[in-house]
Image (cartoon, helix red, strand yellow):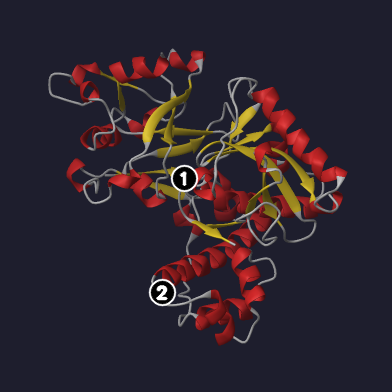
């Protein structure tokens, strides 16, 4: 099942209103950074495979190695010609496509089945959960926000697969709340990241307590649970 | 966070991979409001730069303090200060965001300066910037030391590029 929530940051962009200057600036920086990231990712991949070096890339495009090092460090003075030269020097050209931000403005939350999770093939992406903080007022309503990333990185695509929901809190502007589904906790349990007594079983189903974060109820329904024992452990 | 002195910065687009907490000072810089449209554009660009860290993009890291001026993030000298800068260079004015790692992949952005105000690496302004960063950390985390490490991997676990 896929559900969506609006991305507040893109509201003026997709509504046809005047786009505020900070958002013009954001997307200028984002485009430059994305080109840089693609070049870096490609260079890193080819370098690891022994297919290119900084010196070789510099030689191929007629630049000094120091210049290439600077370009790989930051996209500051890149032009489209720079982008073309760097890709070509590695034997590539970038694939370009336009993205409809009106579609992007709806963040897809993909609910995948337990069996689809790739925990067996890539156990290194398992993050260890922990608790960042509990707001007493919200805890009355079961509101907890969790640190799901302590000690590990989690690719964005995987985060979407594990049915995380990210949203900005009206109560705490600019803060981020994270909600994880029971899919995620089952995933953690199956991958050994949770103690055995935190793992879900038929008998323990009623031990899972629902949790939600401000404004998330309607989006999440009854899908989100946190094991009571685990919660107690986190609160200690 | 509950006291409103530290904020978890949400990426404008995409998801959090490396959490970044910011002080009120950085929050105001990144999220405004701003009186000057040109400064608003500049701060929008800064937010895009900070999102590189948050969304887990590959980031260029200086292998040694004050080296690799083109790197995105660098540890400042002396390493024992555990002070780092994120560099948002373009367009002018170039901005430096100072902070410390709370743990691997967790960055706490505390203070900022325009690069032009900092003079050279040995300047009093740089030293003051580092000391201010450390002082702000102690205000927020009086009993919690920043992450220490011997190499970049101790601070950023994946997707970095040494320059």
Task: Provide residue A223's location: percent of width, then percent of height.
Answer: 28, 31
Q: Name the residue at 46% across, 54% down.
A: A104
In screen coordinates, is A149 left or right of B24? left
Residue A176 is situated, as x and y percent measured from the top left of the image, at 52, 35
Which residue, as the protein is rendered here, is positioned at the far left?
Answer: A202
> Quadrant of residue A182 in the image?
top left
Chain at numbered mark 2: A
Residue at coordinates 55% horizontally, 44% vertically from top-left? B150
B128 vs B151, left or right, is right
Residue B144 lies, in percent from the top left, at 59, 24
Q: Are marks 1 and 2 on the same chain?
A: no
Disc 2: which residue:
A50
- Residue B1, by quadrant, is top right
Report the residue at 21% width, 21% height from top. Answer: A197
Query: Eyeballing the image, is A91 above or below A232?
Result: below
Which of the image's four quarters has the C terminus of chain A? top left
Q: Badge 1 is on which residue?
A: B17
Q: Which dot marks residue B94?
A: none
Camera-side residue: A10 or B95? B95
């Amino acid at each position: 099942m896929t559900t969506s929530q609006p991305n507040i940051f893109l509201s003026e962009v997709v509504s046809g209103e005047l786009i505020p200057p900070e958002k013009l600036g954001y997307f200028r920086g984002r485009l430059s950074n994305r080109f840089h990231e693609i070049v870096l990712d490609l260079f890193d991949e080819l370098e690891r495979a022994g297919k290119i070096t900084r010196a070789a890339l510099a030689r191929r495009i007629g630049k000094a190695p120091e210049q290439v090092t600077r370009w790989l460090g930051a996209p500051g003075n890149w032009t489209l010609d720079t982008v073309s030269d760097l890709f070509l020097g590695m034997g590539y050209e970038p694939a370009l496509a336009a993205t409809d931000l009106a579609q992007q403005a709806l963040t897809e939350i993909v609910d995948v089945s337990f069996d689809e999770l790739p925990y067996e093939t890539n156990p290194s992406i398992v993050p260890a959960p922990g608790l960042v903080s509990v707001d007493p007022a919200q805890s009355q309503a079961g509101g907890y926000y969790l640190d799901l990333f302590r000690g590990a990185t989690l690719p964005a695509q995987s985060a979407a697969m594990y049915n995380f929901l990210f949203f900005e809190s009206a109560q705490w502007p600019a803060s981020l709340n994270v909600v994880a589904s029971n899919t995620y906790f089952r995933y953690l349990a199956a991958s050994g990241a949770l103690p055995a007594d935190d793992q879900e079983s038929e008998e323990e189903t009623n031990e899972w307590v629902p949790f939600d974060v401000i404004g998330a109820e309607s989006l999440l329904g009854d899908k989100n649970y946190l094991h009571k024992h685990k919660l107690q452990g986190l609160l200690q | 966070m509950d006291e409103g002195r530290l904020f978890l910065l949400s990426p404008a687009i995409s998801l959090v991979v490396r959490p970044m907490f910011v002080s009120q000072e950085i929050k105001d810089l990144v999220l405004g409001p701003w009186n000057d449209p040109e400064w608003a554009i500049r701060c929008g660009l800064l937010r895009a730069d900070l999102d590189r860290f948050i969304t887990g993009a590959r980031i260029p890291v200086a292998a040694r303090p004050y080296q690799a001026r083109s790197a995105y993030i660098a540890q400042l000298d002396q390493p024992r200060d555990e002070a780092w800068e994120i560099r948002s260079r373009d367009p002018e004015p170039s901005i430096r965001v100072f902070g410390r790692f709370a743990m691997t992949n967790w960055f706490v952005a505390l203070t900022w300066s325009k690069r032009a105000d900092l003079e050279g690496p040995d300047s009093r302004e740089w030293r003051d910037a580092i000391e201010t960063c450390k002082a702000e950390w102690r205000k927020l985390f009086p009993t919690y030391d920043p992450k220490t490490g011997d190499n970049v991997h101790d601070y950023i676990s994946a997707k970095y590029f040494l320059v």
